Image (spheres, rainbow, N blue to C red):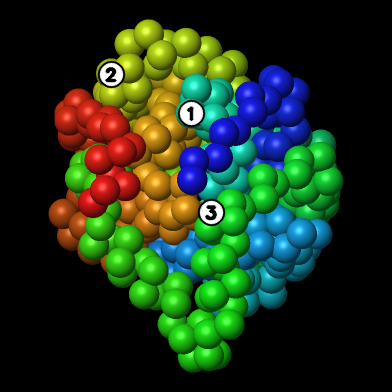
Amino acid sequence: MKITKPSLSFWQIFNMNVGFLGIQYSFGLQQTAINPIFLYLGAPEDMLPILNIAGPVTGLIVQPIIGAMSDKTWSARWGRRKPYFLIGAILGSLCLFAFPTSPVLWFAVGLLWILDVGNNMAMEPYRAFVGDKLPEKQLSLGYQMQSLFVGAGILLANGSIVLFQYLFGGESVEVAGTIPTWLYYSFYIGAILSITTILYSVLKTPEIPPSSMELEEINAAKSKPLMERIMFPFKEIAESIKRMPKFMWRVGAVYLFQWYALFIYWQYTTPLFKLTMGYTTGEAASQSAQMSLTYNVVTMLVALALVPLTLKFGGKKVYALSLFGTAVSLFSIPFITDPIMVLVPMVLFGIGWAAMMGIPYTMVSKVVPQDRRGVYMGILNMMIVIPMGIETLTFGPIYKYVLGNNAINAMLFAGAFFAISGMLALRLNVRSKAKVIDL
């Protein structure tokens, strides 16, 4: 039986997405501050990809499993998705408090693994949460609102890094094996935001109860023997992949190049600015933070503006054009040595980031069945982390032996991959949900 969902007001959609702010603040720190911390603790540049393998591995394992579990969860008090992103937020907060005090490299790498588990536990149910609550006509607004909070969270994270480096960094000389104290404050803010913003959305937004048929399936799953219950998420993931619509396979092709390129960008902006601008690690990290600050301001400004554009021209065209624009931005960055002018390409990057964080989720949510939205959002995340995992395993040798340990070449490589992803995005045609359900 199809559940008719009431339309929500702008502020109701806003409130349900506030929790994404804390999740994305943490993600912003991972983009900009984690790799400089690894460098502070003595990591060689060609080891950065493999040290970041926690994200792809935990995302590959945690998100689809949590998605499948949340599909078959219901509590009258806590709901369906909320228990998972509450636990994830608590775990993430604890790791963010501990991260800047890491005494040695292996300790920081270990904390990154735990932090990624927490963030992934919170992230996937949140994507499904929006799809659960909104009617199809409001899905674009719901996911672009998430895109707005993606920009806001990362903006705050990187803004805090720039601010605290300016206020407390001074002209201090870098000490090998030591993390500067001005980095601590950004992590402490993130730890507080991670839990408080999630709690805000949990308290402000009730979940829609499952239908009688869904509730019957949930209760049946609970009554099964323990081993069957443990194996259920894995069977559900395998079955869902087997029945997955062709549209999602095409999204996977786009994501292969898009996310491989994004991981290169996040890992190699600091080495790039050390090379092109002669910066120290701290100065390069601050410049990287300013880049992220700029493109996330743009993301915030254009995220909701993309809603009428996608309705008028179609998500495929807007998405593909944004990927081509991102490619142009990465091609230009290595050839700009002025620290102010290098922020200009971030306008195109910010538009691309807004589209990447909203449009694919809107399209996928329209073609997957309601009762499997959690697991399919988890599978969509697998399509993100698999190319990131491939990047962590392959790009280190590529960087060292093919690109000559040259961060300029790394950025151009990423730009080429974005151009390929834009061409593949032109193949994304959304089909009716009815056909998908009958697969």
Disc 3 residue type?
Glu
Ranked by sequence position, the earlier of labels 3 and 1 is 3
Q: CA distance from mark 1 to mark 2?
A: 20 Å
Q: Is residue 25 above or below residue 243?
A: above
Q: Position of residue 341 (x, y in %)?
A: 48, 16
Q: Is residue 44 above or below residue 373?
A: below
Q: Secondary structure at mark 1?
A: helix
Mark 1 Cα-neighbour bin, 10 Å: few <14, some 14–19, many ≥20: some
Q: CA distance from mark 3 to mark 2?
A: 26 Å
Which residue position holds label 2?
317
Q: Nearer the viewer, residue 15 or 372?
A: 372
Mark 2 Cα-neighbour bin, 10 Å: few <14, some 14–19, many ≥20: some
Q: Position of residue 69 (x, y in %)?
A: 54, 67
Disc 1 residue type?
Glu
Q: Secondary structure at mark 3?
A: helix
Question: Do the residues under discs 1 and 2 have CB atoms within 8 angstroms?
Answer: no
The answer to whether residue 280 is visible is: no
Q: Secondary structure at mark 2?
A: helix
Tally of marks: 3
Which residue position holds label 1?
136
Q: Residue at x 32, y 47 (%)?
A: 437
Q: Residue at x 25, y 40 (%)?
A: 435
Ranked by sequence position, the earlier of labels 1 and 2 is 1
Question: Do the residues under discs 3 and 1 have CB atoms within 8 angstroms?
Answer: no
The answer to whether residue 196 is visible is: yes
Q: Is residue 120 above or below residue 57?
A: above
Which residue position holds label 3?
124
